[in-house]
Structure formats: structure tokens, C-alpha cells
Amino acid sequence: MSEPSAPIRYFCPQCWAEVAAQAPRCAACGADLTGRPAYRQALEWALRCPEALTARRAAYLLGRLGDRRAVPALIEALKQGDPYVAAEACAALAQLGGKTAWSAVREARTHAYATVRVVALALWKQHARSS
């Protein structure tokens, strides 16, 4: 079964206000929106959004995107204060794979938040079984 598609929402990278897809400037803060970044880079920026749900979605999408260049940004998100953002970043790292990503998942097994520890431990066990 495929996942339902939702329209892409755009946000100002300065103030995180929602903006129109083709807006040249943010109506809320006036930031220049021309020359928008590549999708992966925009998702990496969204990991730092103060709205946790947006950051969680960004982590999820980075995992689905499959671009290992996102690993450093996801590792940083793993260190954020929101346990659900960190847990989603951990899951995305496991999805991307690679030595650096799996090292971060391994370290997350001792994360400060139990939510992250549980996710990391489950992913690590699954990885160990498949290796």
C-alpha cells in the first residue's frame, strides 16, 4: 500500500513562517527566498525548525530520500532537545545506513531520552540480525 501524498509546504528558513511556493520574499520577515536550496538541503535546515513536528517530518523524509550526505545533519538532530525529533533522526540514520550512521545509532542506545534509547536499541538489534 502506498502512503498518501500531501502537498509540499514551504517555510521561510529565517523565521519558519509558511510561504507560497513561488514567493520571492517571506511576508512575515522579508527574507529573500530566491535561489532556494536543493530539497535535501532544505530538509536539513528544517531539522532545526523550532516546531518539533516539522523537524520530525524533515528527519523522516531525509531517511526516505536515501541521500547519505544528510548523515551529519541527522546526527546533529539526534542531539537536539526534543526526544521525538531525535528518535526520528535515529530511525532515518538506520534507513540511510553506512558506518557513520550506524555508529550514531549504536551511540544513541545510551541517549539521555528513553524514547531514543528504545528506538536505537530496536534498530541496532535488527541491524545485528541482518548483518
Image (cartoon, rainbow, N blue to C red):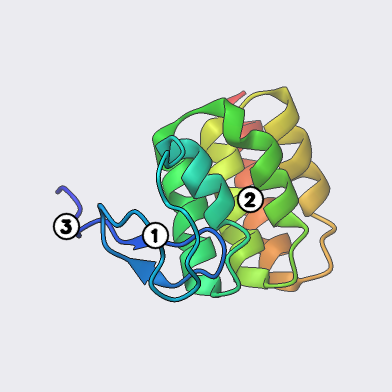
Q: Earlier in the sequence, mark 2 or mark 3?
A: 3
State the quadrant of the C terminus.
Answer: top right
Residue at 67% x, 71% y is 83
Residue 47 in the image: above or below residue 93: below
Q: Amino acid at mark 1?
A: Arg
Query: What x and y, as percent, mark residue 17?
Result: 44, 72
Q: Amino acid at mark 2?
A: Cys
Q: CA distance from mark 2 to mark 1?
A: 34 Å
Residue 95 in the image: above or below residue 68: below
Residue at 78% x, 35% y is 103
Query: What x and y, as percent, mark residue 22?
Result: 25, 52
Residue at 57% x, 51% y is 45
Residue 79 in the image: above or below residue 94: below
Q: Residues within 10 Å of mark 2 (few under 14, many from 20)?
A: many
> Secondary structure under badge 3?
loop
Query: What x and y, as percent, mark residue 112?
Result: 84, 68
Q: Nearer the viewer, residue 130 or 123?
A: 123
> Secondary structure under badge 1?
loop
Residue indicated by mark 3: 4
Q: Amino acid at mark 3?
A: Pro
Residue indicated by mark 1: 25
The reply, left or right, for residue 52 in relation to residue 77 is left
Residue at 45% x, 30% y is 66
> Secondary structure under badge 2?
helix
Q: Earlier in the sequence, mark 2 or mark 1?
A: 1
Residue indicated by mark 2: 90
Q: CA distance from mark 1 to mark 3?
A: 30 Å
